[in-house]
Amino acid sequence: MTSLPSHLCIVFSLIIALAACAGPRPELVQVRALAAEGSALNAFSELSQRHLDSYRRSSAYLSPQQDAQARLLAAQTRAAHADVTAIVQAIRLYLQALGQLARDDAFDLRKEFNGAGSALRAWPDSGIDDRHVTAYASLLGQLSRLDGRSSQQIHLAQVLHDGDAPLQALLGALDGLLRLYDKSSDNERDIVLGLLEVEIAYADTPQQRLLTVLATSVRQDKSEEYRLFGLRHTLARKQLGLLAREHGRLAMAITSTPGAPP
């Protein structure tokens, strides 16, 4: 069984402790904590930006044939990036709305909602398909119906219930993208380290001794860099999985609370 990241264990331990003191609606404390836990989306955004910059990092190591293919892939990645960012923004906005509903404060998300955009494009090669486009529209549709009225908690169970399926689909899209990013990073690693291996092997004359030392140092640094980002991809997927499971649990728990809207 895979253990949870330590900081997330602390967060959800605090949730349980706070819930014990929260009176008859401890689940509201847990919803607010879920809404405030942004590490999964922050990590995804950082890794998505790194993926976007892959060609810039690797271009110096590419053969002419590899460069042509990499340029095409980089163009496709740039074209899809706005829609990937839109998915993350929609999830953030949804979680923000949940936090506001759980606090029962008046709120207005019109500015953020207008900035989320109205349409998402499918990018099958990147793992964003028609199912995710539909989920995105559904999640934003949930938010468009919230008007900031008082007694907002009566809406919370319904929003959690109706929002769970599209949220799970969008988190699944981000998980698929992380798998793509990890595979792309492995390919980039093989190209970069492979060329350095060749340079080191053929730099065997006294005049090339300094080149050998530099190439060996770069290879060691790059190898560690790719190893660490491989671990970050794995951790980010675990964080997204935890967010998905906790939302699903709360959706079920609050919907099952006596007096909750059907």
Image: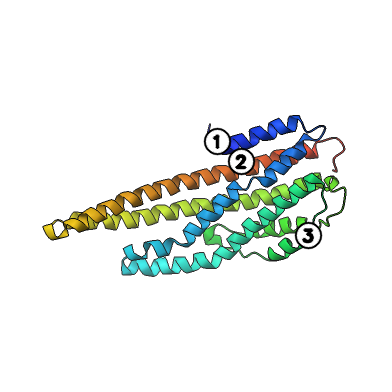
Amino acid under disc 1: Ser
Residue displayed at 74% across by 41% down: 251
Identify the element where label 3 is drawn: helix
Q: Are marks 2 and 1 in contact (CB under 8 Å)?
A: no
Q: How far apart are the alpha carbons under marks 3 and 1?
A: 36 Å
The quarter of the picture where the C terminus appears is: top right
Mark toward the start of the polypeptide (3 vs 1)? 1
Mark number displayed over residue 242 = 2
**Please, which colouring scheme is shown?**
rainbow
Residues packed near mark 3 inside 10 Å, few (<14), some (14 to 19) or many (20 plus):
few
Q: Secondary structure at mark 2?
A: helix
Q: Tell which tag, 2 or 1, sits nearer the viewer.
A: 1
Left/right placement of residue 126 relative to residue 247 reads left
Q: Position of residue 64 (x, y in %)?
A: 32, 69
Measure the C-alpha gap from mark 2 to mark 1. 12 Å
Q: Amino acid at mark 3?
A: Ser
Can you identify the residue that label 1 sits on?
6
Query: Does 135 sit left or right of 80 as displayed?
Result: right
Provide residue 44's location: percent of width, then percent of height.
55, 52
Amino acid at the residue labelled 2: Leu
Residue on which the image places disc 3: 144
On screen, residue 171 above or below 251: below
Mark 1 packing: few (<14 Cα in 10 Å), some, or many (20+)? few
Q: Are marks 3 and 1 in contact (CB under 8 Å)?
A: no
Instruction: Tell me: 65 left or right of 29.
Output: left
Q: Secondary structure at mark 1?
A: helix
